[in-house]
Amino acid sequence: MNGARSLVKTLIASGVDVCFANPGTSEMHFVAALDAEQDMRAVLGLFEGVVTGAADGYARMAGKPACTLLHLGPGLGNGLANLHNARRAQVPLVNIVGEHATYHRHLDAPLTSDIESIARGVSGWIHVCEDAQSVAADGARAVAASYGPPGQVATLILPADTAWESSGVPADPVTPCSPALPSSERVEEIARTLHAAGSSAVLLLNGSALSEEGVALAGRIAAATGVRLFRDTFVARVTRGPGRGHVSRLPYFGEQVVEVLDGVQHLVTVGTKAPVSFFAYPGKPGELTPDGCSVHCLAEPEEDGRGALAALVEALDAGKIAPAVETEQRPPLPTGALTPEAIAQALAHLLPEHAIVMAEAATAGRPIYSALRASAPHDWLDLTGGAIGQGMPAATGAAVACPERKVISLEADGSGMYTLQALWTQAREELDVTTVIFSNRRYAILEMEYHRVGVGAPSERAKSLFDLSRPDLDWVQLARGMGVDGARATTAEEFSRELARGLGEGGPYLIEAAL
């Protein structure tokens, strides 16, 4: 058995049974091992950003890592943006990067690069395999390392000769570390604080605190104390809808965060940190905690946020208190002009039970989060790291993880062009994804930011850098070129009809919403 075969067998034994891949010459022995091991599903992405983004979306919904297969340093470099997003999502991901054979590296062949340095900015764990006999054990350690806590990108660099040489046997799985609970003293202190503070306190949630159980626990705490519930602006996953509690989303712009937190005297973080502005702006604060507000940490990101909430419920004697939950409220279908609000209304009317919504709709998608609040039970996934081009790949990975659930991909037209190759993978794998392209033909967020940074009104020359016309993108033709059927909607009625069609049929479908 060679190193690649022992590695694949070890990954499967460790629970990793999906590989999103864009291989090259150095990875051919790993490909041969995939060919021999039927228990590992191999999914091809035509661009490395699709591969890494799909692995992120898969981990969010499966609760375990997939592995990637990337070709040397340039392949890893092409996938970095979505590895950055995965790092910010704190998901487990095993990132396998091929390398030149150990004895070939010193020759400085054209594709030679410093793979470790490229990986360092997005990886919580990095290891270079140096001999075939250790490859399997290295793979088992990579899987365990990916779980953290918190979840992280574990990058395993695999020189070609360590993959093709004889290795012996697969390795046993390594048990991941479990997240720790906060001390009872910390929990008791925060319980006393919330009892006294009431509605002047906020719980800010992320990570496992936003699971269905975590949201229910937070709801009990809110019912017992009057504390308000918020979540970070962009999170990996949050459960929402009828029968579940509501957690408000912190706004994107810093001044809006300052406004919603005005008067808060105690901010309790669970699986996150105190909020900061996404960017620096002249004359505006970067730290967004109100003056005079005390920040308390119930659980660090590497700790058990859900367990911490359970401990706090017990300390407050709130276990028998019923949390507030949403009741189903679906609006009628919209009519007239096609606007972001009309799209949100149509989605709220037609949203299937237990759908997965991947949101990268940018400025045009702002009404949707609140519109779906009580529509139907669903999971909401965000663009976590701010690097656009995550939406369609993450939707692809989520559909691989949950083939029985409808996935809805909300995509801005500018962001979508970064990784539209994900549509091809959706078609090839027959994934049940309905993609909505918000086609306003501009980078609208940059128009806003141009004004916000204080450089005045843009000239026509500056505006051209935010404009996506001349020529206009034809998303229906682009999708069909990738094997995905679709249609263009220009009115609310047309959009509702096409959305119903996409949601009612199996397989991928794309709607270009002309705004």
Image (cartoon, helix red, strand yellow):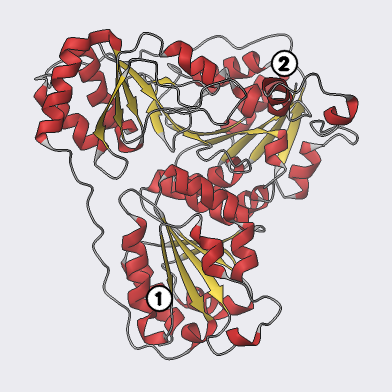
Residue carrying label 2: 338
Give the residue at the far front of this rendering. Answer: 283
SS for dot 1: helix
- The residue depicted at 36 percent of the width and 53 percent of the height is 64
- How far apart are the alpha carbons under marks 1 and 2? 51 Å
* In front of the other: 191 or 286: 286
Label 1 sits on what residue type? Leu
User: In the rendering, at what x and y percent does residue 221 appear?
Assistant: 21, 19
Q: Position of residue 511 (x, y in %)?
A: 70, 31
Q: Residue at x 59, y 63 (%)?
A: 76
Q: Left or right of 255: which side holds 274?
A: left
Q: Secondary structure at mark 2?
A: loop
Residue at the spot 17% in from the left edge and 41% down from the top edge? 181
Q: Quadrant of residue 274?
A: top left
Could you tell me if residue 514 is visible in this image?
yes
Q: Which residue is mark 1?
A: 7
Q: Quadrant of residue 315?
A: top left
